[in-house]
Amino acid sequence: MALAALALALAACGSDDDKSDSTPATPLPATTTPGSPVIAVTAADYSFAGLPATAKAGSTFTLTNASDKEVHEMVMLRIPDGVTESVAELLAMPEEELDAKVGEVEPSTVVVALPGQPGRPVVGDGTVLEPGRYAVVCFIPVGADPKLVEAAMSAPPGTGEPEQPDLGDGPPHFTKGMSAEITLE
């Protein structure tokens, strides 16, 4: 789940052609319906603040990065019905066991935020419609170069899959505690 979500998120980063390498990422407007809450989440080194335990399905999630050095992302993955383990327990499982437990899970939304900046949705628009339990995870490796992430987010679409930047071999942020769980009702 972790590797697939990270690969999907970074692949999606190269899908916007309206940014250049020198333009800071700006948030894209989310599609909300009247009465749907907007939940403002703040990423820090290495936690999410402002994320409630429960929220209304159809909520839109925004992300602001309070870090002055680390890139952060908010990957929201629906946990399949019947899975009772906590997010921490799921993330601690060996990849084969995790795959057997949850199968292939596509992110409902991914929002990436460069240091000190508001986030930009790269998968979906920040709105999560389906009720259920969600893992909220940052898979970015510790020490990832913000310039490489920005370049991937700014790359014009091409033919085939965009080249993935080498973000280094640091441990993913979730290994330092940057994960959470939320239930959408």
Image (cartoon, rainbow, N blue to C red):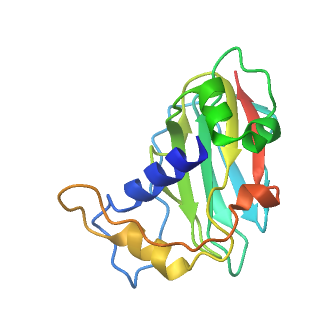
Q: Identify which residue, 38 or 14, lies in the foreground.
A: 14
Question: Is 171 above or below relative to 110?
Answer: below
Q: Is residue 53 left or right of residue 147?
A: right
Q: Is residue 185 left or right of residue 22?
A: right
Question: Is 106 above or below relative to 177?
Answer: above
Q: Residue 110, how many percent across, how many down?
A: 53, 49
Q: Residue at x 29, y 67 (%)?
A: 18
Q: Residue 91, how many percent across, how many down?
A: 73, 43
Q: Residue at x 69, y 44 (%)?
A: 136
Q: Give the quadrant of the C terminus.
A: top right
Q: Residue 175, how many percent across, how many down?
A: 77, 57
Q: Give the quadrant of the N terminus.
A: top right
Query: Please, which residue is most extreme toward the bottom here?
Result: 22
Q: Residue at x 65, y 76 (%)?
A: 116
Res 172 → quadrant = bottom right
Res 38 → quadrant = top right
Residue 122 seen anywhere in this rendered image of the structure: no
Res 47 → quadrant = bottom right
Q: Identify which residue, 129 or 3, lies in the foreground.
A: 3
Q: Identify which residue, 134 or 159, lies in the foreground.
A: 159
Query: Please, which residue is most extreme toward the left here?
Result: 159
Query: Please, which residue is most extreme toward the top here?
Result: 82
Question: Is 28 above or below relative to 150?
Answer: above
